[in-house]
Amino acid sequence: MYVIATAGHVDHGKSTLVRALTGIEPDRWAEERRRGMTIDLGFAWTMLPSGRRLAFVDVPGHERFVTNMLAGLGPVPAVMFVLAADQGWQAQSQEHWEAIEALGVRRGLLVVTRCDLMDPALAVEEARERIPSWPMVTVSGATGEGLDDLRRGLDLLVSSLPPPDHRAPVRLWIDRAFTITGAGTVVTGTLAAGTLRTGDTLVLDGERVRVKALQVTGGPVAEVTAAARVAVNLRGVDRDRAVRGKTLLTPDAWIETDVVDVRVDGGPPPREAVLHIGSASVPVRVRPFPGRTRAARLTLAQALPLRVGDRALLRCSGRPITSVLVLDVRPPALRRRGAATKRAAELAPFAVSEHDRGGAGEPANRVPDAATVLGWRGVVGRSELAAMGCDPGGLDVPGAGDWAVDPGWWAGLAERLRAVVAEQPGIPVDAARTVLGLPARDLVEELVKSCPPLHVSDGRIDGDGVPAEVVSAVERLRAELAGTPYLAPEAARLPALGLSRRAVALAARAGLVLRIADEVVLLPGADTEAARLLAKLPQPFTAGDARAALGTNRRVVIPLLEHLDRLHLTRRIDDRLRVVVDRERHDD
């Protein structure tokens, strides 16, 4: 099936023409038929001469119902634009045409109708001034004159449409919702991409729902592929939850966001407006970025499932409709000084309109690709990139699991990791992950592989051996402690021995020294030997007793005793007293 929308001024014969083509009354409500104009969206379908099925979304033309009109135009790829020969180009003709252009709908068929009432030459001339490139036919919906030409023109139009992606995730904008006795809630919409099946699980307003049944062109089906007008019967969903502007989504395939960065086409955007996309109409606040750019940030009154490359409209009373192109659906916060200027520079290559380019150079609708978004963020999940609308399939970048990392960021992370390990040899992998600001442990482990001679051992990151200058410093320490093994050098003395913080960390990780506290360094085995000596004291003993027995001072003995407690070589009885655990084991 193919789906197109009608467009044009109120009472120019759109519904009459659709009825003549399909035999179906698109004006569904009694009020519409009584007043002779479409108030809400109407739907009808027909079989074209080629055998292709074509569905029409008949949109209202009256200015009071422009929101409904935009809801009908939003999801469709082509338009049948209707102009009455006896009235010519009117106000709503212009408004509809501006909306079509703003939405980027490039394919369509221009139809001058009511040719039985007036020679169409003048209306054709007016239309050609504004729509020079679309094919045109002249018809009369009342007499049937030209309808065969119209059907052939529609056949040619739909044959030129690009095929929809049947494997794409579903985003069905709900344009109607109602209740059927015995069936429950039914919603309708235009399936622009993807496939729907009976029994599918979809997401509605953040909650999972099941598809009970499907209908296309009035008949039940088990499966619907895009493009199609479809009615979806939802199991166990209240009618109040399924309203126009909501969406049915493939689970985990979309990002619902209330802040987006966009390119704004046309004049300066209003600071407050209504965003129209699909069948949704949402109030937004607009913040233009500084400098010579068309980029702006939109803050939405409610979250919508948006993707990079989406086209939407901004509408503000008394101002022309403005088109926006979505550039980022997960933009960074703008809290720091200069953040807005930096962001404007990032968006600048994509925030230039076709008019600004003068028709040359890069395509006007160029949007950020996966590599660009990855460069902005440094680290992003491939599944998240896909949900943002950026295909990660061509990315050949470092990473681990679902995570992808920008090559420039990866090189910077490698340098930082080397510095961290040099400062803290044996740093745990999880601690390194925190220092580097990485979202997953396996990214650190993969990063270590790219930084030889670094390696992971027992959950810690080590370098390649102990430098000779560190070994020499340990020998100087050993000589200094030869007669007084528990009288650790003062903090100011350590650098003179060559034991900087880095050197102590390297030596401790290699087992060359025993670091019992910051800047309290002894020789390996000093702790077990201390327990043996303390076992000879009358039990229990005080810290003062231990200080005297070991020939040291309070600066060393307190952290040493706490270290022995952690090793369960000693045990505290109260605030003053300790005993050696398993004293007999320490006897000569």
Image (cartoon, rainbow, N blue to C red):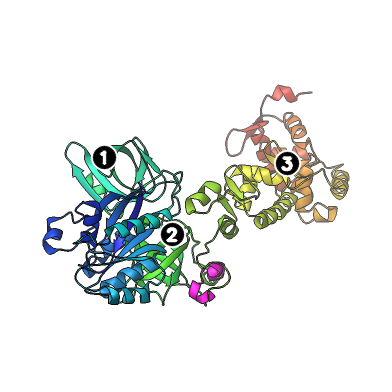
Residue 537 circle label:
none
Q: Where's residue 395, x and y in %?
A: 61, 51
Residue 330 horizontal side relative to residue 525, left or right: left
Residue that mark 2 sits on:
310
Give the tally of numbered discs: 3
Q: Residues within 10 Å of mark 3 (few under 14, many from 20)?
A: many
Q: Nearer the viewer, residue 205 or 468?
A: 205
Q: Secondary structure at mark 2?
A: loop
Looking at numbered disc 2 in the image, what kind of residue is underneath it?
Answer: Asp
Judging from the image, what secondary structure is the residue with disc 3 in?
A: helix
Mark 1, other Cα within 10 Å: few <14 / some 14–19 / many ≥20? few
Q: Main secondary structure of the magenta part?
A: helix
Magenta-span inclusion, residue 527: no
* Position above or below: 136 against 252: below
**What residue is shown with label 3?**
547
Location of residue 150 by image quarter = bottom left
Asked if residue 277 can be seen in this view, the reply is no
Residue 280 x, y percent position in the rendering:
32, 58
In which quarter of the view is residue 219 placed? top left
Q: Is residue 78 left or right of residue 402?
A: left
Q: Which mark is in front, 1 or 2?
A: 1
Image coordinates of residue 234 in percent, x first then y, are: 28, 40
| Separation of marks 1 and 2 at Cα, in angstroms | 32 Å
Q: Is residue 346 magenta?
A: yes
Residue for point 44% across, 44% down: 166
Residue at 66% from the left image edge and 27% from the top image edge: 581
The Cα–Cα distance between marks 1 and 3, rounded to whole angstroms, is 93 Å
Labelled disc at residue 219: 1
Q: Earlier in the sequence, mark 2 or mark 3?
A: 2
Residue bounds of the magenta highlight: 344-358
